[in-house]
């Protein structure tokens, strides 16, 4: 026989409550040898949590404002026009739905990393419910009906249990076995759509970030590199940035003097030692007018 219900409860309780795991139903959490850990893909290890925690949202308007001000950190899919249709996972008997970049195409990228309100506590410690997802049966932009968090719920007190759960990390909708019976919805006709917000900031999959003590030279100020120096062009110098993936060229500014051979030339040399004027002349008019930089250390 497989694990009994009590064994499963004991395993889950030790793992979720105390962060430890074994299959001994007689052991308690402080007697267990092994920690309970997860294996995560690098794309789900968020490296901009410090910034994200500085953006609490007690309501939807604030969440949308935060997303608009941080478009490389938060993706706003909260408007009904941006709702995401969910895809039934084959073989799950209408119990599990997933979000994909292309609905119905399980070979397309799964839409993970939805913003869990509890990850961004408000000053009071309460979760930022402005980021909470909302579930609809049918396209909310075309008459879909809101499915509230209490629909399908049964029991009271300690026996109360919800009819559906949204797994924010993986973008999964989990439906209880009696959800359809309790709500009166038809399983085969159920068409779940979700609205909410996703984390699209940097992850461990983007590579290691710069250590705080590292020193860099950049072309523009970057707050994420506290010890960076900004490269600026001095007099007579120009910087040509070819853009991402290209090269940066540092070169002399064009003085306007034509490259040529001058006879009995009259030239002007600036403080950087560049010829900024040149013209040919007769043997009796040739002259040199120059301004030189005084070498360091001279009196």
Image (cartoon, helix red, strand yellow):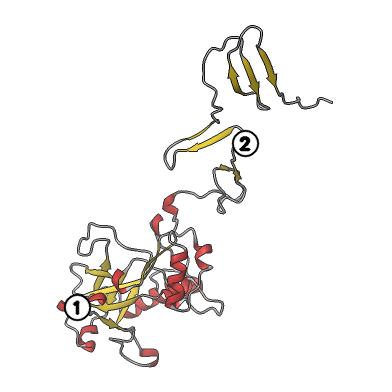
> Is residue 248 rendered to the left or right of residue 180?
right
Sort mark 1 into few (<14), some (14-19) or many (20+) by Cα contacts within 10 Å. some
Disc 1 or 2, which lies upstream in sequence? 1
Q: Is residue 214 above or below residue 186?
A: above
Q: Is residue 14 visible?
A: no
Quadrant of the rendering where the N terminus is positioned: bottom left
Quadrant of the rendering where the C terminus is positioned: top right
| Residue on which the image places disc 1 | 190
Residue 60, given in percent of the width and then of the height, sits at 42, 77
Q: 238 or 287, which lies in front?
A: 287
Return the residue found at the far left: 188
Using the rendered view, name the quadrant where residue 100 is placed: bottom left
* Rendered image: mark on residue 12: none
Q: Is residue 221 above or below residue 137?
A: above
Q: Closer to the observer: label 1 or label 2?
A: 2
For mark 1, give the secondary structure: loop
Q: 256 or 189, which lies in front?
A: 256
Q: 12 or 239, which lies in front?
A: 239
Residue visible at 52% across and 15% down? 260
| Residue on which the image places disc 2 | 234
Residue visible at 54% across and 12% down? 261
**What is the total number of numbered labels drawn onto the structure image?**
2
Q: Is residue 146 visible?
A: yes
Residue 206, given in percent of the width and then of the height, sits at 43, 51
Residue visible at 26% across and 80% down? 176
Q: Is residue 92 above or below residue 294?
A: below
Residue 151, given in percent of the width and then of the height, sits at 29, 86
> Is residue 229 rendered to the left or right of residue 17?
right
Residue 28, given in percent of the width and then of the height, sits at 47, 76
Q: How far apart, in angstroms, are the residues tagged by discs 1 and 2?
A: 66 Å
Sort mark 2 into few (<14), some (14-19) or many (20+) by Cα contacts within 10 Å. few
Using the rendered view, name the quadrant where residue 188 is placed: bottom left
């Amino acid at each position: 026989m497989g694990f009994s219900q009590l064994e499963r409860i004991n395993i889950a309780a030790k793992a979720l409550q105390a962060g430890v795991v074994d299959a001994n139903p007689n052991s308690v959490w402080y007697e267990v040898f092994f920690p309970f850990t997860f294996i995560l893909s690098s794309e789900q290890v968020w490296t901009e949590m410090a910034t994200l925690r500085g953006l609490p949202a007690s309501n939807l308007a604030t969440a949308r404002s935060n997303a608009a001000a941080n478009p490389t950190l938060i993706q706003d899919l909260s408007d009904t026009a941006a709702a995401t249709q969910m895809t039934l996972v084959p073989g799950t008997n209408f119990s599990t739905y997933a979000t994909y970049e292309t609905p119905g195409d399980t070979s397309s990228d799964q839409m993970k990393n939805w913003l869990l309100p509890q990850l961004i506590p408000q000053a009071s410690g309460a979760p930022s419910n402005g980021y909470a997802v909302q579930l609809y049966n049918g396209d909310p932009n075309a008459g879909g009906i809101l499915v509230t968090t209490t629909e399908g719920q049964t029991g009271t007190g300690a026996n109360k249990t919800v009819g559906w759960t949204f797994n924010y990390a993986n973008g999964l909708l989990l439906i209880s076995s009696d959800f359809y019976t309790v709500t009166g919805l038809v399983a085969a006709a159920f068409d779940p759509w979700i609205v909410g917000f996703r984390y699209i900031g940097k992850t461990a999959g983007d590579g290691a970030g710069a250590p705080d003590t590292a020193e860099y030279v950049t072309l523009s100020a970057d707050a994420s590199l506290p010890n960076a120096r900004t490269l600026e062009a001095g007099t007579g110098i120009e910087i040509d940035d070819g853009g991402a993936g290209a090269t940066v060229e540092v070169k002399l500014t064009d003085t306007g003097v034509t490259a040529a051979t001058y006879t009995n030339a009259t030239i002007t040399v600036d403080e950087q030692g560049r010829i900024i004027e040149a013209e040919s002349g007769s043997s009796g008019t040739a002259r040199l007018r120059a301004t030189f930089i005084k070498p360091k250390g001279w009196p």
